Image (spheres, grey):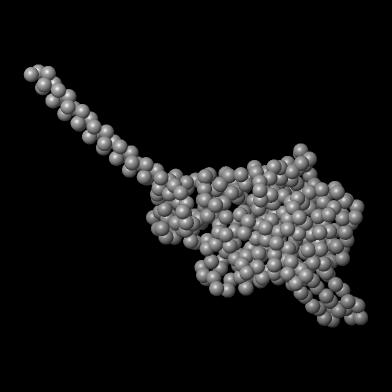
Amino acid sequence: MHLSECTGDSESVLRATKPTISQIVLDIISLDYHETLMAPAGFAAEKSLQDILKNKKGQYLAVYEGAVPMKDGGVYCCVAGKSAIQIVKDVAAGAMANIAVGNCACYGGLAAASPNPTGCVGIQDVIGGAVVNIAGCPMNCENFTATVVHFLTFGALPELDGNGRPKFAFGKLIHNNCERRPHFDAGQFVKAWGDEGARQGWCLYEMGCKGPMAHQNCPTVRWNGGTSWPVMAGHGCIACATPGNWDAAYPFYKRMPKVPGAGVMANADKIGLGVAAVALAGVAAHAAIRTATKGKNKD
Amino acid sequence: MAKIVVDPMTRIEGHMRVEAKVEGGKIADAWVAGTMWRGLEVMLKGRDPRDAWTFVSRICGV
């Protein structure tokens, strides 16, 4: 179901590789309603939807893209003369599972960015929980197809975290799996776009990267069939799978305060050198004492 | 005179409603409306211009 959205999550899912979207749509599921892909339009499209709600009650998987504008009775997003609020309530009621894709459908996302002009919220706030949130802006297609395949294989949804996100995809901090992490530990930071550090692939923390607050599997799964991901391409993370990131992670180019451990390895090297110097001094002192003792014994 | 309403207009990005007035088998007049508004213009007010792209790139994800 398309709500207050940009279709970026549909675009994302078209790029799925494991399995591909064509395998899922042509071989595994029946895609009965998707406004961007379906052949019918107007009343014929609406008939497709109403037929599912009536004839497939409790047998369909409902997927939502986009937030739900609650302000002014829901006038800011309407399809076939009905508000997004009404559509979500009608569709969710008969679904065997509800999946929100993208941060707008999960938590309001960009549509809810300050000052949230249309009063947008996520699906879970409209139907009161029981939603799987495939967060991200857009969501990573592999995380979505993996959730659908998990559901079809085991007849149950994957284990979720406190934000309704599957743990297999959102259980780890981006900062802890980032290929630039050694540069963070070594205190090697990009200081300006295009500087020597940027060319060397150093850490983007000082350029505002929000990897230390973001949970997602971008560094391992990556995007476009495992080709790359934003930090690999040279831009900081904007914590796009974090609830309220458009305010919580904003400004995107301002350094996060108080992330512990910056330059910890560089400091360890210095401490190591210091310890070595003390040890050498100890050896020298010990040798001096031994020499003195030797002399004394001689005497 | 007949009136045709196409809502939703499918295979596009976004939400659109088309109303057309038909006379003698031909469209005599038509009204097209976008039926979704998020207010990105409002969100951008007061922000650093260098941040704008992150917001406006989400106008359309296609």
| Picture quarter with the C terminus of chain B | bottom right
Q: Nearer the viewer, residue A136 or A22?
A: A136
Q: Is residue A9 left or right of residue B1?
A: left
Along the line of sight, the residue nearer the viewer: A111 or A230: A111
Expressed as whole percent of the image width and height from the top left, the position of residue A3 reads 74, 63
Where on the picture, by quarter, is residue B42?
Answer: bottom right
A291 on left or right of A223: left
**Residue A115 image position (x, y, % from top left):** 62, 69
Residue ID at (20%, 31%): A284
Q: Which residue shows up at 62% across the image and 54% down it?
A: A241
Residue A214, placed above or below residue B48: above
Whether residue B62 is visible to the viewer of this picture, yes or no, is no
Observer able to see residue A214: yes
Where residue A258 appears, x then y in whole percent? 46, 54
Quadrant occupied by the N terminus of chain B: bottom right
Residue B3, quarter of picture: bottom right
